[in-house]
Amino acid sequence: MPETAVLFGKNSDIGKALAERLVRDGWDVLRIGREESFPMPPPWDLYISAVGTVEPIGPFFGLDFEEWQGSFIANSLLQLSVLHAIWPYRRKDKVVDAMFMAGGGTNGPFTNYSAYAAAKITLIKMCELIDDEEAGINAFIIGPGFVNTKIHQQTVKAGPDSRTACETIHTSTDCGGMDRNKGATCTMIPNMRLLPRRDRPSNL
């Protein structure tokens, strides 16, 4: 019986690359878009959230708060709400996995990206809490680094408001460097394996 992944963020570049990789590896993949309602999923083994936006970019007090709040929700609460909704339909004979992503700003100031950074810090803490509260799930968050995707074009478009992040996006060597002429591929997560709880390093 193939393993089943629920992928939230089917239109994201990283989401598309992950879905292609999983299908090649023999998984069934249910892809969900941000604006879609979704059917009751089959029993699932893996939830991946590939949703993200770094906008609005700029000083907190110079931003429209409703836009800021919408970004915070999209980058954290919306992703958690999907996991919460599909939780009853998980495979119950094993430990399932939930994977989120955080691209920066969690270990220090991420100037002018307050909505994105605050949301990702929330996701990190929720992974810790969910993982501690529920023995049946391995919840974790990864940092894919700078990858040539639509989300990083938002930084380029922001110009001076993006400050040093715009420089980083052009010089980063994360994930083998970023070729601006190429899109995301799953080489950014080489030999991706989801570790059972008992096998995870203590620093994950």
Image (cartoon, grey):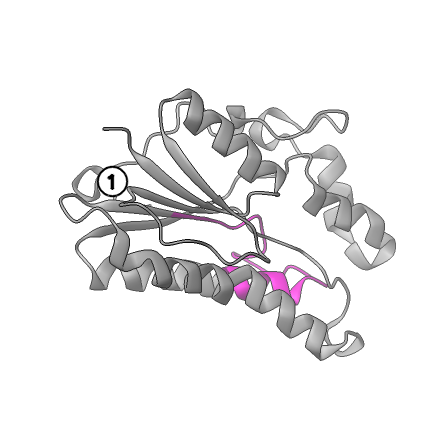
Q: Is residue 27 above or below residue 42?
A: above
Q: Is residue 136 above or below residue 192?
A: below
Task: Name the side, left or right, on which 27 lies relative to 154.
Answer: left
Task: Name the side, left or right, on which 115 lies relative to 80.
Answer: right
Q: Nearer the viewer, residue 161 or 74?
A: 74
Q: Position of residue 117 (x, y in %)?
A: 58, 61
Q: Nearer the viewer, residue 27 or 144?
A: 27
Q: Position of residue 124 (x, y in %)?
A: 42, 58
Say whether residue 203 is visible: no
Span of residues in magenta:
99-120
Q: Is residue 40 above or below residue 176?
A: below
The residue lying at 25 percent from left, 45 percent from top is 96
Q: Is residue 7 magenta?
A: no
Quadrant (top left/top right/bottom left/bottom right) for the C terminus:
top left
Quadrant (top left/top right/bottom left/bottom right) for the N terminus:
top left
Q: Position of residue 111 (x, y in %)?
A: 70, 62
Q: Position of residue 120 (x, y in %)?
A: 52, 59
The residue lying at 56 percent from left, 68 percent from top is 73
Q: Residues within 10 Å of mark 1 (few under 14, many from 20)?
A: few
Q: Is residue 29 above or below residue 71?
A: above
Q: Amino acid at mark 1?
A: Arg
Residue where numbered disc 1 is placed: 200
